Amino acid sequence: MNRRTALSLLSTGSTAGVVGASLCQNEARAADFSAATPAMERINITRVKMINTHPNGIGFGIVKVETSEPGLWGIGCATGVRRYATLTTAVEEYLDPLLRGKDPDNIEDIWQTVNLSSYWRNGPILNTVLAGLDQALWDIKGKRAGLPVYRLLGGKCRFAVDCYGHASGGDMPALKDSIARLREQGFRHIRIQLGAYGSPQLAKPNPDFRAAGFGAASDTVAEIRPYMKIVPKIFEMARTEFGDEPEFLHDIHEMLPPIDAINLVKELEQYRPFFIEDPFSPEDIAYFKILRQQTACPIAMGELFNNPQEWLGLITDRLIDFIRIHLSQIGGITPAMKVARLAEWFNVRTAWHGPGNTSPIGHVGQAHIDLAIWNFGIQEQVHWGPETHEVFSGLPKFENGYMVVNEAPGFGVELDEAAAAKYPLPDEPWFRPIVRRPDGTPVRP
């Protein structure tokens, strides 16, 4: 139809006819497409519940989403903050009534709805239960499609997930032996730590601050100067004993005053670390600009982040090299993929936070993202004990330092609820041991 004909139709009141014809054509095309690719039958969410378990002395919180299709359910990791009673209340008294009857295929809409449902957002409790829910929905979508989730995220970008192992010890010989064992297992990337975070074993008894009316028996002491002196010696030993081939990492764990962290990172640059993790606390992220101006040492940051404003500037200003957020802390697979895609354009790689208290389904979720994104950097590796294998089946294998996931639909991990019930959470709540300076001042990690 040319311009003159269109104007003529408009001027003679024929617009309805043109629009009607166009709509008929669109409906015909939609009918043809529908016939060629029939949609899956709609299902509904029938229940959202929390499953807490404590195999091998480690607590895990798992969100399970059940559907109207018999036998179809999904699970996701909601561990992270370890406030299990609060998380359970959030899931079963808020998420469950909000989501019953919803279509689990609409992951983005559900994520946005839950995120905005209480108006206040970007807190660790909401983000953690949202992460468990989000991963469970991806699990369901993969099962319905008959595909592993990584294929829904874009397919494989690599054959397996490269991991780093944890080497530690109370003294240098013990640390050396730990590194050697990991090298024998095929690990090319190894994190090296001596003693507790921020404090080598100096054979000094911890003061009991309870006499002054504060503190707990589990509190430990971190001294700044001894730590700053020993870390370069750790790297010197590792390079001397194992050469240039292995990639070594170290976690400052935000234990130092910012200016001391800057000086330590500058000194470590000569040993070519793969990255130095968490030099500053989230409250001190403005120091990253100063750090970047003074050293080219690769930096990883992010395990305590909850709010996008905490990582956006670090990525877009290229102040870090690895984004190390904890998937449970930011709301799950859906936002993590957005972070990874953003980071790609600023050449920032991923190194998701994956400690031992991240559930197996949480680790597998990270691995599926790792397989699908271009800017994957490295993945933290853990070992699971026999009780954990009893509760969770379908766990990935570790071969030559790589994590290999199975090819089952969804995330390929099954949860045995009867086995989970055999290992209940302890009656006493968990509290993180507080690290203090010698005078009793709490260290802010």
Image (cartoon, helix red, strand yellow):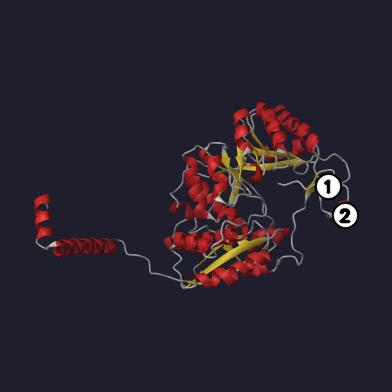
Q: State the image coordinates of residue 342 (x, y, percent, origin top left).
A: 48, 44
> Residue 210: which numbered mark, if any?
2
| Element type where label 1 sits in the image | loop
Q: Is residue 349 visible?
A: no
Q: Amino acid at mark 2?
A: Arg
Residue sitting at 46 percent across and 66 percent down? 104
Q: State the image coordinates of residue 192 (x, y, percent, origin top left).
A: 71, 38
| Element type where label 2 sits in the image | helix
Residue sitting at 61 percent across and 37 percent down? 288
Sequence-first disc among 2 and 1: 2
Dividing the picture into quadrants, the one containing residue 25 is: bottom left
Q: Is residue 301 visible?
A: yes
Q: Amino acid at mark 1?
A: Gly
Q: Count of labels shown?
A: 2
Q: State the image coordinates of residue 314 (x, y, percent, origin top left).
A: 56, 40
Q: Nearer the viewer, residue 178 or 352?
A: 352
Quick check: 338 left or right of 213? left
Is residue 408 shown above or below 172? Answer: below
Quick check: 358 left or right of 26? right
Q: Residues within 10 Å of mark 1 (few under 14, many from 20)?
A: some
Q: Nearer the viewer, residue 142 or 442?
A: 442
Residue sitting at 55 percent across and 71 percent down? 96
Is residue 186 shown above or below 55? Answer: above
> Residue 363: which numbered mark, if any?
none
User: What residue is shown with label 1?
Assistant: 440
Q: Residues within 10 Å of mark 2 (few under 14, many from 20)?
A: few
